[in-house]
Amino acid sequence: MTNQAAWIKEKQGKPLVIDEADMYKPGAGEVLIRNHAVSINPVDWVMQDHAFFPMSYPNILGCDIAGEIVEVGPEVTDFKKGDRVISHAINLVTGSPSHGAFQQYVIGQGNVTAIIPDNLAYEQAVVLPLAISTAACGLYQSHHLALPLPSIGAARLGKTLLVWGAASSVGSVAVQLANASGFDVVATASAKNIEYVKSLGAKVVLDYNSSSVEDDVVKALQDGEFAGVFEAVAKPETLKVSLKAASRVGGGRLAPVLQVPEELLPANIKKAPEFIFAASLYKESPEVAKAVWGEYLPAALADGSFLAKPDPIVVGTGLEKIQDGFERHKQGVSAAKVVVKL
């Protein structure tokens, strides 16, 4: 076997360079995956354009993997050769090219890897990994929302979570996981995506562009005990509205995907000092990783109670199409995710 990758050769290097890469050996708790599809996240092209996060060069970007396990490392008992899986690549934490998604063979961490059913195409499944870890951190880590862990057929708790920006890939997962934790979800999205978010299990979906959205959210949140806000967008203009609405119904916890200026935070809403950092899941919260990735997700995907959403926009096949995927993503996507098949 030989390996190739789409390398970023230097800081802000463009385009990505297709070249040989090592054939890696999985270590303890790791698996070697033959990639069949990758998806593009904002962090990928932002890292290329702006290098906002420290990284050594040359290196390999990418967070989302869908493929087939070809080798398991020591201490791995939940996977075997031939398993079809998705996995969250953690290069941004380790700095190792072996952990970057944009290559044919990549090392995955066993506790942020999940078996997928045979009827789920790789290009559909690959929309999930980074979104799963991001949503799981925000919903379940003790310093964020600290919700009960998800389960199939969870009892309803009479509590309500606000998910702002629910048609995004992270928002789509957050709605489904919160529902699987027994929470009713009040969500916001653009008008064209309201039915899509309802299909994910949200109880109420409101148009965040409506002039009355703050009052509409407050009204919708009256039906159950308010648990907090998952901010899947965290832009200042949306934060002002979502946090004011949450404050009006008693406040609570906030889990944002981006940093929140302190001046926007009402006195009765609390958040962790840091925003959600998805890659912290595999090392800092192993109990959450096991519950979500190892126990809930494979079973829920298999029985159809959890959906691999949003749908992919496949821009082509081959490592050379990843740069095209960056450019397509920059044009904007709504209730969709840019995917490249390998």
Image (tube, rainbow, N blue to C red):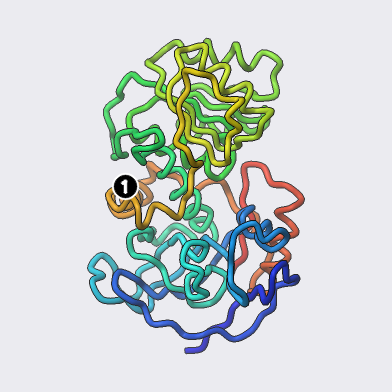
Name the quadrant containing residue 88.
Answer: bottom left
Q: Nearer the viewer, residue 234 or 291?
A: 234
Q: Nearer the viewer, residue 116 or 238?
A: 238
* Residue 80 x, y percent position in the rendering: 29, 72
Relative vertical location of residue 25 with respect to residue 119 in this rendering, above or below: below
- The residue that disc 1 covers is 288
Identified by mark 1, the residue type is Val
Q: Circle 1 sits in a helix, a strand or a loop, which is it?
A: helix
Please indicate whether residue 267 sits to the left or right of residue 144 in the image: right
Q: Could one spot residue 342 in this view of the protein?
A: no
Q: Residue at x 67, y 31 (%)?
A: 192
Q: Nearer the viewer, residue 145 or 104?
A: 145
Name the quadrant containing residue 223.
Answer: top left
Name the quadrant containing residue 115.
Answer: bottom left
* Residue 44 x, y percent position in the rendering: 63, 59
Q: Could one spot residue 193 in this view of the protein?
A: yes
Q: Residue at x 73, y 71 (%)?
A: 13
* Residue 262 x, y percent position in the rendering: 58, 29
